[in-house]
Image (tube, helix red, strand yellow):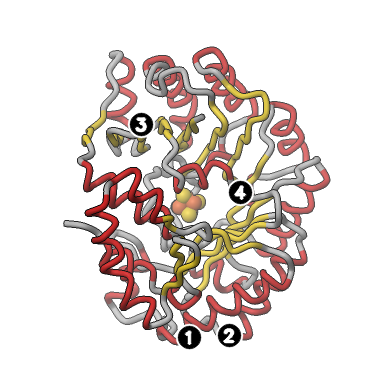
Amino acid sequence: MAGIYLHIPFCKQKCAYCDFYSIVNDKLIEEYVNALCKEIELQRNFLTKEKIKTIYFGGGTPSLLSPKQLQVILDKLIQNFDLENEIEITLEANPDNLSVKYLRALKEIGINRLSVGLQSFIETDLQLMKRKHTVKESIKAIGDAQESGFDNISIDLIYGLPDLTISMWEENIEKALKLNVQHISAYHLTIEPNTLFNKYYQSNKLNLPTEDESLSQFKILKRITEQKGFMHYEISNFALYGFISLHNTNYWMGVKYLGLGPSAHSYNLTSRQWNIQNLRKYMDAISQGKIPYEIEYLTKIEKFNDFLITSLRTMWGLNTEKLKKDFGKDLETYFLSKTKKYIDQNLMKESNSNFTLTEKGIFISDNILQDFLHE
Ligand code: SF4
């Protein structure tokens, strides 16, 4: 079983917080679709005949592609890979690109899961983040998607935003839940280098919440979503029963995946590789039959670190029996020696050899996971 990720590196404009690789130039889309199809052919043996269980169009903004262009890519995948009959095919979309006609066409070509970047139900937040859509367009997009037959819809939200009060955040979550979606990905704002927010931040123009306020926002998110039946199955992900993202869960479970397009990452259990992060150079190399990538072969310790980070992100946690079986007694001892202080501080808990982060631990998971990494 394996997954395929396709990076669509085009956006209508750059959002103020985003550091994903994309360019604001849709004139290159057609040329890019051809390059991507060529890369699919070049990479057809990467997953060594594993059955493909998930396909994920991410970006950038995949909803800038027409249904016909998406169909061409899907056909190329069908010709070159062995796809499962029951397959999850996700498309990331922005609300301002979605119409009933477009959504129906997506459904017809086999897209069965949407991940829609709503981010906030506060108009001024959307403007500050330089999002291209309004709150009204967000709500309409979800309604249109449901009317077009989509019954597996995820939305993205951002918290920890400048000037976001607890009551505003609570209202945001309530509005999100009223949309009757099956999945919510909620990320705390991080200030990334080379973003507009970083410029504002450097000149003290962002009134960011304190750590305590951010923790309260996270707890509220968890409480309200759980009251409505959502499982908090990964640090930033919440799903109704039966609607966890298979594609992302496979990343955390160490399943093989192939990433196609500029900046996309691939993993095949022994190595990680990533394509060049430059659309022009990517397309030029592909046109000459070369895949422009760098590769890193993983040592046992690097695989152990990956296992640690990915397992502890999820509600299933890290099982020490599996750790011992896959990595040996020494690394199990190393892991256990690190756990005590976190258990004492109520940041981690253990049950039947399964270690998971507590609510408090999840909120500062980046620091904890960093500390667990073996040098
Ligand atoms: S958040 Fe999405 S739409 Fe905005 S710049 Fe990043 S990839 Fe593009």
Disc 2 to disc 4, C-alpha distance = 25 Å
Question: From the viewer's perspective, is 266 left or right of 356?
Answer: left
Report if the CB atoms under discs 1 and 2 are less than 8 Å apart: yes
Residue placed at 25% from the left, 54% from the top?
331
Q: Which type of secondary structure does the marked residue at label 4 adopt?
A: strand
In screen coordinates, is 166 left or right of 112?
left
Disc 1, ligand 1: is the CB inside 8 Å?
A: no
- Mark found first going from the N terminus, 4 or 3: 4
Residue 226 in percent (x, y) is at: 67, 70
The amino acid type, in three-letter code, at marker 3 is Asn
Q: Position of residue 58 (x, y in %)?
A: 50, 41
Of 130 and 51, which appears nearest the observer?
51
Residue 195: image x %, image y %? 34, 61
Which residue corresponds to mark 3? 268
Pointer 3 with pointer 2, Cβ within 8 A: no
Sequence-earlier tag: 4 or 1: 4
Q: Quadrant of residue 332?
A: bottom left
Q: CA distance from mark 4 to mark 3?
A: 25 Å
**Label 1 neighbour load within 10 Å: few <14, some 14-19, many 20+:** some
> In this figure, which residue is indicated by the disc labeled 1?
213
Label 2 sits on a secondary structure element that is helix
Label 4, label 1: how far apart the Cα atoms are: 27 Å
Mark 4 lies on residue: 115
CA gap, disc 3 to disc 1?
Answer: 40 Å
Specify the amino acid type for callout 4. Ser
Of the image marks 2 and 4, the number of the one nearer the N terminus? 4
